[in-house]
Each structure stands twice: as C-alpha cells, then as structure tokens.
Image (tube, rainbow, N blue to C red):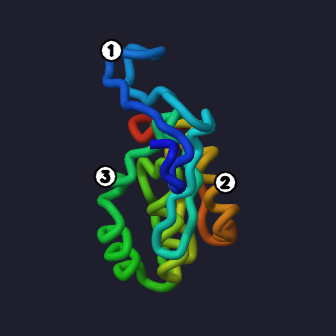
Amino acid sequence: LLSQPHIRSVAVFEPRGVGLDESRAGVRHVAGDPDLEIIYKESGLSFRLDISQRLSRLSRCQGGRGERERLATLVAPGERVLVLGSGIGITACVLGARSAPAEVLGIERDEVKKEFAMANIRDNKLQRTVRSIAGDLLDMSQ
C-alpha cells in the first residue's frame, strides 16, 4: 500500500474489546507515517481530524454530505442554529459557510472533538459566526 503515491499511512480498525482501550473501538498504526491526522474536504471547507482519536465517522456524521448541504438551504438569514453532538464541527461549519445565520453553536461532550472543532472553525475563518462548546446533552445544567 505504501508504494501508492497517495497513501502516507496504513492503519487497521480494531473492534471493541481489542487494542489499548478494550472498552472502545479504535485504530492501530501499522506502517508508514505514524501521524494519523488527516484533512477531509467538503463543501469547499477543510477539516482536520485524527483517526487515532476515533474522530473518523464522516460517512454518518450528522447525516452525511448531502444532508448537510440540504440543511444549509433551510437556514433562514439571521437565524440562530444549535448543533447537538457536533463532533469536529463539520455540520456547524457547513451551515455557517453555506447559509447566512446570525450564529451556529455546536455542543459536544468529547473535549478532544471540541478542540478539533474549534481548530476547524478557525482554519475555515468562521469564528465570527460559528462556535463550539463542551457540554453534555443529557445534563445541560453545566
């Protein structure tokens, strides 16, 4: 695999019960560059994520690319949008970039994902409209 010009690293999926953290599924580096941080591009935006941190649920993240684009068409100008379980900020950033909201607020309980979301918001220059905060959806009294 590493002889292919577009492949930098090789990692394998480890199901729950295997690997360093037996309580969670994860990935393990096998060959090539051990840095498993990648750039994912969607809707003219770029998103950093680290697959070693289990941040790679892109295909089902907030409904997928088509659903995020569809949602952006439903946001009225000046509207405030709340994205629950916002992960690394993909949906929040797409809504902020593809519509004209007053504010998009993403809430994520995983601190690592929230930090990636904040970096993605900055990298895409959306910090005037899009924010990400840490919070537990089941306990919003925090």
* Residue 4 coordinates in the image, percent (x, y): 48, 51
Residue drawn at (37%, 68%) of the image: 68
Query: Residue under circle 2?
Result: 119
Query: Residue under circle 1?
Result: 17
Quadrant in the rendering for residue 18: top left
- The answer to whether residue 109 shows anywhere in this view is no
| SS class, disc 1 | loop
| SS class, disc 2 | helix
Relative to residue 66, is residue 58 depicted above or below? above
Amino acid type at mark 3: Arg
* Residue 135 coordinates in the image, percent (x, y): 52, 40
Amino acid type at mark 1: Gly
Relative to residue 110, is residue 64 depicted above or below? below
Query: Residue under circle 3?
Result: 60
Amino acid type at mark 2: Ala
* Residue 93 coordinates in the image, percent (x, y): 53, 66
Q: Is residue 14 left or right of residue 117?
A: left
Residue drawn at (63%, 61%) of the image: 121
Whole-angstrom CA distance, mark 2 to mark 1, is 31 Å
